[in-house]
Image (cartoon, rainbow, N blue to C red):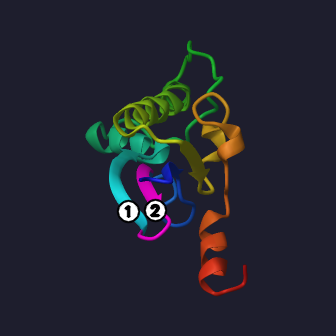
Amino acid sequence: MTLLTLATIASPPGPTRGASTAVVVTSWWPRAGARFLGGLILPGARACSAGLAAQAPALPVVEPWPADSAGLQRDTVGAIGAAIGIGYGGMVAACLERVQRDSAIAEVLVTGGNAGPLLGAALPRRAYRPTLVVEGVEVLAGRR
């Protein structure tokens, strides 16, 4: 019997910041421990911009704009930044919804320094644990 099936959405900070967002499903049994069940890896918001510029070199690489940006942008930078900002949360939410349907997960956990903009509309704010990796290292080191 599975005690807990958990989906973790991670958007890590650091040198690969914005490169990817992962939706990972793990089950935990009291005696056997954790077992990876599968998941999805999405391009990060910044990777979407870089990929667009790589395929269309005349277009600039831009930072994603907020999800509440206006849909009628009047310049290239605004059009790209707003589109990624508006659409990225929906892409993550759609992938989470599919994973939830395929796995019957009980809990969603959001972690990573870049997850902040996805909270609220796309992901549950109450599930945000930005320092989860540090917490895990503390547990392994016997400090908790």
User: Of 122 and 57, which appears nearest the observer?
Assistant: 122
Query: Residue at left 69%, top 39%?
Result: 125
Image location of residue 134, percent across then percent down: 65, 72
Q: Say if 131 sits above or below 144 in the image.
A: above
Front disc: 2 or 1: 2
| Image-quadrant location for residue 116 | top right
Residue at the left extreme, as displayed: 55
* Marks 2 & 1, CB-CB < 8 Å contact: yes
Residue at figure coordinates x 63%, y 27% from the top left: 121
Distance from the alpha carbon under mark 2 to that under mark 1: 8 Å
Residue 35 - label:
1
**Residue closest to the far bottom:** 141
- Dot 2 or dot 1: first in sequence order is 2
Q: Which residues are magenta?
A: 22-32
**On screen, residue 126 above or below 32:** above
**Foreground residue, 103 or 30?**
30
The residue shown at (51%, 41%) is 62
Secondary structure mostly seen in magenta is strand
The image quarter in which residue 73 lies: top right
Q: Residue at x 63, y 56 (%)?
A: 113
Q: Could you say which is closer to the camera, residue 6 or residue 94?
A: 6
Mark 1 lies on a secondary structure that is strand
* 141 relative to 139, above or below: below
Count of numbered circles in the view: 2
Q: Which residue is mark 2?
A: 29
Farthest residue toward the front? 1
Tell me if residue 100 is in the magenta stretch.
Answer: no
Q: Residue 63 versus residue 142: which sits nearer the camera?
A: 142
Q: Is the residue 136 above or below the residue 98 in the image?
A: below
User: Around disc 1, counting alpha carbons within 10 Å, would you say few (fewer than 14), some (14 to 19), or many (20 or more)?
Assistant: few
Q: Where, by quadrant of the figure, is residue 144 drawn?
A: bottom right
